[in-house]
Amino acid sequence: MTVRALVIDDSRAMRRIVTGTLEGFGYETRQAGHGQEALDVLHEGWVPDLCTIDWNMPVMDGLQFVNAVRTNPAWRAVTLMMVTSESEHGQIVRALAAGAHEYVIKPFTADAIRDKLALLGLLPQEVSL
Amino acid sequence: MTAIDAGPRRRAGDRPPAVAELIDEATVTEITEQAWLALVGEDEVLVPLPAPLPADTLSSWVGITGPWTGTVVLTTGRDTAVELTRALLREHAPEVLEDEDVDDALGELANVVGGNVKAVLPGPSALGLPEVGATPPAGSPADTLRVDVLWRGQPLTVSVQSPLHTEEENEVPL
């Protein structure tokens, strides 16, 4: 079974790194440069199993995106993982309260991402811990 | 008239906290090292030694707004910024790096370092989007915490700087 991820970050470099990491785990990926672009992908019908979401982005930030996804029942099954340099406790609580499932603070390692995916049950069998 | 409780206020004559009262060089160095190890590479060591920056530099910065307001600035030589971009992107680097790639990578490093600096400062604070250019915003020379390191033998600085204060900043909600 193919696991799909939408990588949302305004940094091309970070998108490449996260995409590369996820593809290394067997994911099929797409990218978006901000929340609105990501919503466009979902509306297009490409609904992923996982979204990795930066917080600070132009146009639509990560928290707005989480709120938008959570208001649409059709996207209830999408797992939302914040991947961001926002590391204040209050911000983490806000994101989780809005409906994010996991929170990874930049900088991160590939192992940290793998551990979170394993906890979420989103690590393909062949790379399971 | 409706009374609005804006919390404690800073009044004219009150001095905002100096950055050195809020964060020290060792913490900024550690944050930067962590960013390098995770993003640039596990073997990418930063050596805490000052060295003169070359004439042609590139900076990236992020603003922090909150109880402490200021900017976190990364500065290095333009050639070093290109090398840094390749190291950061590793096998994901395009064959030909464009200026936009370099700006983006250096901006993301400022974002990560700045975000973690913000977490140490009094909050709640907001982090701005990263900006990149040859001339970062001017900071208060007397209220700047600067860390000098060498990466692959090339100089790089990280500055946590308060803005240049003006007399008209009178009463500001904290």
Image: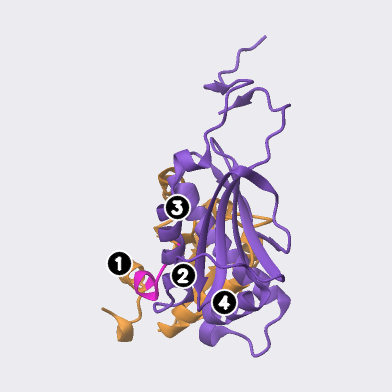
Chain colours: A orange, B purple
Measured as percent of width and height from the top left, residue B40 is found at: 48, 75
Query: From this viewpoint, which residue is outermost toward the top?
Result: B1
Query: Disc 3 designates what residue?
Result: B25
Q: Position of residue B153 (x, y in %)?
A: 51, 77
Residue topped by disc 1 = A119
- Calculate the distance from the C-alpha at mark 3 to the C-alpha at mark 4: 22 Å
Mark 3 element type: helix
Amino acid type, label 2 = Trp
The tag on residue B36 is: 2
Sequence-first disc among 2 and 3? 3
Coordinates of residue B27 in the picture (x, y in percent): 41, 53
Residue, far bottom: B95
Q: Earlier in the sequence, mark 3 or mark 4?
A: 3
Q: Where does the magenta region start and end? A: A106-113
Looking at the image, residue B29 lies above or below residue A110: above
Cα distance, mark 4 to mark 1? 33 Å
Q: Nearer the viewer, residue A109 or B47?
A: B47
Mark 2 on the same chain as mark 1: no
- Which residue occupies 52% across, 87% down? B91
Is residue A1 magenta-colored? no
Mark number for residue B84?
Answer: 4
Residue A90, by quadrant, is top left
Q: Are marks 2 and 1 in contact (CB under 8 Å)?
A: no
Q: Residues within 10 Å of mark 2 (few under 14, many from 20)?
A: many
Q: Secondary structure at mark 4?
A: helix
Q: Please name the amino acid that badge 3 sits on.
A: Glu
Residue B7 image position (x, y, % from top left): 52, 22
* Residue A15 visible in rendering: yes
Q: Are marks 4 and 1 on the same chain?
A: no
